[in-house]
Image (cartoon, grey):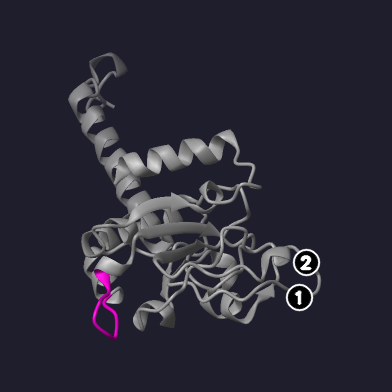
Amino acid sequence: MADKIPASRKKPVSQKRVAMVLASLVGMMTMTAAMLLVMEGGALGTAVPGWAVNLPTIQAMIEPNVPLRGQAWNFIIIYQSGDEAASVATLADGRYTGGNPSPTLRPKANFHFVIDSTKSGRMDGELEVGTSWQNQVSGAPYAGWPDARSYLFTPYNNAVGICVATDLHRRPDEAQHQTLLQLVHELQKRCPNAKILFQWELDDRAQPTAEDKQYAESFRASL
């Protein structure tokens, strides 16, 4: 009993030690969250990773199989598929699946580039290169596409066609936006005469929303 230290004489806990323990705990939690983000490819809880925008990859992907017709492309037109499950293959086949219990048809379109969503079975924002770009031939449909009433319209032969797999009048999500931004930036280097246009800017019947116009303005400012 004589060796017992009275409670009043116990050494007080160092505030510096408490701060160090708390800092170590916060650091471990931060590192764990960062590792989860890397593994998930996006926000916590995201099951499907987004496509990593990698400039060397995009630069290699947009090298055509034939000599580039850089001076021939006067426009770069950005389309929306109206179908989040769209891909190079389904757009070329004319299949339409978004929100419908059974497939319907839409006019076929051999886009130069398609930027996917997860509903196509690919990574969000993944870039697909069409054979029309690889062979440097027309791949941008008429302004009113995918309206089937305009199927007789002649496709543009001096425009690069990029289609984002998303609903009409819905801006691309962040992964798609980053891919689109880098793709257009690289295309501008190769096609110096090309003017950036959104599909609705070419269609007199289109009714762009305020969000459409705001996105177009901010997109051009980001290039």
Q: Is residue 168 above or below residue 21?
A: below
**Residue ID at (66%, 73%):** 107
Amino acid type at image mark 2: Asn
**Residue ID at (53%, 51%):** 202
Residue highlighted by disc 1: 103
Is residue 178 left or right of 124 when viewed as pictured? Answer: left
Is residue 44 among the parts visible in the rendering?
no
Most common secondary structure along the magenta stretch: loop
Q: For mark 2, give the secondary structure.
A: loop
Was residue 65 drawn as part of the magenta stretch in this picture?
yes
For residue 100, the mark is 2
Residue that sits furthest to the top in the current view? 8
Q: Nearer the viewer, residue 205 or 113?
A: 205
The spot of residue 135 in percent (x, y) is 36, 84
Give, as a single range, the part of the protein colored magenta. Answer: 63-70
> What is the quadrant of residue 55 in the picture?
bottom left
**Residue ID at (43%, 51%):** 197
Is residue 182 left or right of 105 when viewed as pictured? Answer: left
Q: Nearer the viewer, residue 136 or 39?
A: 136
Q: Is residue 219 above or below residue 145?
A: above
The spot of residue 39 in percent (x, y) is 39, 63
